[in-house]
Image (cartoon, helix red, strand yellow):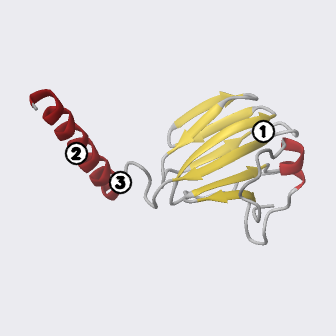
Amino acid sequence: MSENPSRTLITAAEAAATPPFPGRLSALLLEHGTMQLRWYAPKDEDKQTPHEQDELYIVASGTGWFRRGPERVAFAPHDALFVRAGEAHCFEDTSADFGTWVIFYGAKGGEGSTESLAKTSLKVVSDRAATVDQLVG
């Protein structure tokens, strides 16, 4: 399904019917730049490991618990869950109908990585300099 990056709509039913590639836990649906849209629906124990990119889950169906580090929160459909790159996390005690959109994005190491922060800091400094020039000039 990822071959067509210009797709406007991918339904939850299409996503749920897309099998993961061998050796992967989630199905790749779309790629654009650093962003990947995936579908994840573990049927038993969630065996995922920390990822290299920041990650956003948007729960499509089902309920359960989400653990990120020491924090454990209940979730339901339409909830959004954020995980920084490299953080341990997993879904626990999920209902049989659980399925979630997964969005990976940004640089390896995450938006909060030293490299990403340096780029952001440089942009902020440049933006502030332009603003000061506009005010003074």
The CA span between labels 1 and 2 is 46 Å
Instruction: Give the x, y percent position of residue 134.
Output: 17, 32
Number of the front mark, 1 or 3? 3
Q: Amino acid at mark 3?
A: Ser
Against 24, residue 14 (above or below) is above
- Say whether disc 2 or disc 3 marks the residue closer to the N-terminus: 3
Let me know if residue 65 appears in the view: yes
- Between 34 and 51, the one nearer to me in the picture: 34
Q: Is residue 132 left or right of residue 69?
A: left
Number of the front mark, 2 or 3? 2
Q: Circle 2 — which element?
A: helix
Q: Amino acid at mark 1?
A: Thr
Q: Are marks 2 and 3 in contact (CB under 8 Å)?
A: no
Instruction: Give the x, y percent position of residue 32.
Output: 62, 58
Q: Residue placed at 42% from the left, 49% from the top? A: 111
Q: Is residue 134 left or right of residue 68?
A: left
Residue on which disc 2 sits:
126
The CA span between labels 1 and 3 is 34 Å
Q: Amino acid at mark 2?
A: Ser
Let me know if residue 26 appears in the view: no
Q: Are marks 1 and 2 in contact (CB under 8 Å)?
A: no
Residue on which disc 1 sits:
94
Q: Quadrant of residue 34?
A: bottom right
Q: Residue furthest left?
A: 136
Q: Residue furthest bottom?
A: 22
Q: Residue placed at 57% from the left, 48% from the top? A: 55
Q: Circle 3 — which element?
A: helix
Instruction: Give the x, y percent position of residue 92.
Output: 70, 41
Q: Residue placed at 55% from the left, 39% from the top? A: 82
Residue on which disc 3 sits:
116
Name the quadrant of the N terminus.
bottom right
Q: Residue placed at 81% from the left, 46% from the top? A: 10
